[in-house]
């Protein structure tokens, strides 16, 4: 389950960055280009992906275990 949520987190981060760049008209070539709402959606996806990755990274250790 940890691997699946890590993969999902990475995908959300990548999709979020792409949506932000397209929404800000930096990455052309789609119906999302220049549409600011896609930059907002991308920021949300990026934030959720970062939280997932953070929770997977810190949640894997048992209390009192060394790194």
Image (cartoon, rainbow, N blue to C red):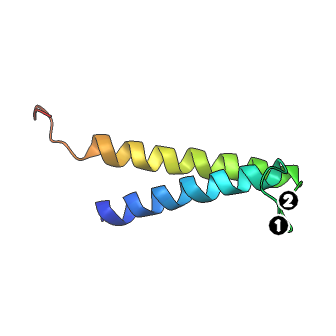
**Residue 27 screen position, x and y as percent:** 77, 56
Q: Is residue 41 visible?
A: no
Q: How many marks?
A: 2
Tell me the residue at 30%/40% (across/down). 58
Q: Is residue 51 visible?
A: yes
Q: Is residue 35 above or below residue 67?
A: below
Q: Write down the residue under mark 2.
A: 33
Front position among marks 2 and 1: 1
Side of 30 where 50 appears, left or right: left
**Residue 26 screen position, x and y as percent:** 80, 49
Side of 29 where 46 appears, left or right: left
Q: Are marks 2 and 1 in contact (CB under 8 Å)?
A: yes
Judge by depth and name the residue closer to the eye, 14 or 2: 14
Tell me the residue at 47%/56% (across/down). 9
Q: Secondary structure at mark 1?
A: loop
Cα–Cα gap, marks 2 and 1: 7 Å
Side of 10 where 67 appears, left or right: left
Q: Write down the residue under mark 1.
A: 29
How crowded is the residue under tag 1: few (<14 C-alpha within 10 Å), some, or many (20+)?
few
Tell me the residue at 81%/52% (across/down). 23
Q: Which mark is residue 40?
A: none
Q: Quadrant of residue 4?
A: bottom left
Q: Work out which quarter of the rendered image holds the C terminus and state it.
A: top left
Q: Secondary structure at mark 2?
A: loop
How crowded is the residue under tag 2: few (<14 C-alpha within 10 Å), some, or many (20+)?
some
**Residue 43 screen position, x and y as percent:** 68, 46
Q: Quadrant of residue 18?
A: bottom right
Tell me the residue at 15%/41% (across/down). 62
Residue at the far left: name it.
65
């Amino acid at each position: 389950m940890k691997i699946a949520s890590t993969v999902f987190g990475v995908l959300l981060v990548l999709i979020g960055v792409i949506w932000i760049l397209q929404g800000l008209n930096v990455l052309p070539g789609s119906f999302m280009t220049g549409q600011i709402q896609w930059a907002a959606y991308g920021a949300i996806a990026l934030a959720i992906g970062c939280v997932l990755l953070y929770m997977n990274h810190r949640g894997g250790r048992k209390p009192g275990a060394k790194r």
